[in-house]
Image (tube, coloured by chain):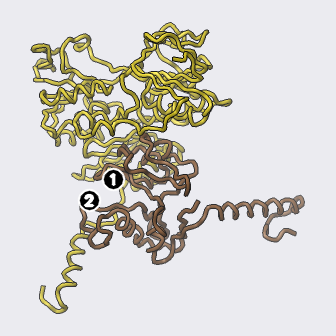
Amino acid sequence: MSDRADTVIVGGGVAGFQAAMTLRRLWPEKTVTLLDKEEETGYYRTLLPQFINGTLPENKLFFPPSADDRHLRILTAVRVESIDREKRTLRLSGRGDLHYQRLLIACGGRPLVPQPFVGADCAGIFPVRSLTAARMARQWLTSHPEVVVLGGGLVGVKTAAHLAGFGYTVTLIERDDTLLPLALSAAAAGLVADHLRQKKIRLLLGRTVDDLHSTAGAISAVQVGGDWLPCQTLMVATGSLPDLAWLHDSGLLSEGRLEVAPTLQTADPHIFAAGDAVTIVDSARYTPWTWPQAVVQGALAGENCHAAVPRSLRRYSRVNTMNLNGLSLAILGLPVPGAARAVYAPAGAGIYRELFHQDGTIVGGALVGDISLGGRFHQLMATGLAGERDLESLLVPRKGVWSPQAAVFVRNVRRARILPQGVER
Amino acid sequence: MKVIAVHPDRCTGCRTCELYCATERGSNSKNLLQAATEEPLPKARVRVEGGGSLSFPLQCRHCRQAPCIDACLAGALVRDEESGLVVIREGLCIGCWTCTLFCPYGVIFPWPERKIALKCDRCLYMERPVCVDVCPTRALEVVDMADYDQFLQGKGSQVATGLAYAGPGLLLLDLQHPA
């Protein structure tokens, strides 16, 4: 193995992969080495819930294969133990040293496992984060159908929504009083909760797991507020924290955070970072740890690595979108204190669309059940050009071209053709 | 690059383009009457905007710096090298709909029933786009962007000539015939 590369990327998540692809496209003569601690790399983490429930075949989980590239080397199951910034080398576990010209840190997060499960030595507990764990969960679930999903954030809600309806009994536990507390207003989250209840998911909001019980080395029950709840499979989706232990004596961390400028450059001009590992310091500290942000940041960090003049990240928004097994959801931003609200929520339609606006600018919002025109709201939000427009009328989704009477109309046309004129109908 | 141009002054807002786009490009039967009864209902890739005094059909603008391509997580949205158009490879689309949130025109449509995103590809593999063909008032037209570049260049040289001839204090009222 050659022990040097023009650019070394630590982390094979989507940010790392986007960076690798960008680097190869922009600087075809520069070599790239991508290191990943997982056994497999280059897959859609956001599709893991669909993979776990068995609807998505494994081959659809991976990024489409690219042509063989001898300047791009991907090393899996490699851990970086430490970094020597003066010599610009990384110490790899069991593989010696690797010299870099530019380093791009996209090592992502590690799952945050709550207290009762730390070090718990029993089977049936799976963080929803890696393919290895997802594969084990998929296998385990076939014979352990009583599922508890811990955490009502994006990953937890999505996991619960996709497990419902496959013969599992699903309970979702969230510490906050509403679902998706970091993404939606209480009213919008209410509609998501209704959708999950319709899918026969039991919701325990404002609760935490205090203890667990295991039988024969496997989890059998969890204690929630004094009650014991049967639980054969526990899916942990309580968020993640940047996986930065290997950087602790590098001098790059400030109060445990890997802080970067809007150009995604760290304090060391040879080191860039992107994705769930970073905190962006601009007028405030931003941690937009979403999948779309990882994609954008990965590409930008890759571009800036060797650029003469680095570009800045344009948006720190946590804009995100997903399909909760039948309910579409687009997140534009949390309510801002003091902002006014424009809402479109017809009774019983399963649709809730809201925008928060302040001084003529859209500052946040969410579209639940119907995400049409999300792009325009996002654009208005980014450019601040909402002005004095009537946002409530903008929120009304337009009816499709096929009216509900279309089928009746077609039937009548057919009958009109078949029956001769003048015949009593 | 050939794109669809719109004459807003000719559009009456009848939505014929939407109906036929949905039928021809989205239905199994390719027949308007049968398409209306299909399940799921076929979706159009064009949308008639506005209403009242001004309406116009809007479909993908095939932006030169397309935010949707940057936003696509799956690499499904790409620029077709030959035509220069932004196209979606449906087999690769994972239905995350991030692109729909990044399209400033709102003309990438989520299609939950088929778990993909839908957008206009200017009927790339057909002789002429369906919407252009069926518009009763000829409000839609296929134009070549190169012609527009030429037009803009001509405009630029007119302005430059006008400025060169305009003495101090002259109002540039007629750039067509500089003095």
Question: According to the colouring, which chain is brown?
Answer: B
Residue at coordinates 50% horizontally, 7% vertically from top-left? A249
Q: Position of residue A218 (x, y in %)?
A: 14, 17
Residue at coordinates 35% horizontally, 32% vertically from top-left? A45
Q: Secondary structure at mark 2?
A: loop
Which colour denotes chain A? yellow
Residue ID for mark 1: B111
Q: Are marks 1 and 2 in contact (CB under 8 Å)?
A: yes
Q: Position of residue B41 (x, y in %)?
A: 28, 62
Q: Position of residue A7 (x, y in %)?
A: 57, 23
Q: Nearer the viewer, residue A289 or A342?
A: A289
Q: Report the amino acid beneath label 2.
A: Pro
Residue at coordinates 42% horizontally, 15% vertically from top-left? A79
Q: Report the amino acid beneath label 1.
A: Trp
Tag of residue B40:
2
Disc 2 sits on a residue from what chain? B
Q: Residues within 10 Å of mark 2 (few under 14, many from 20)?
A: some
Residue at coordinates 50% horizontally, 31% vertically from top-left? A298
Location of the C terminus of chain A by quadrant is: bottom left
Q: Is residue A91 left or right of residue A310?
A: left
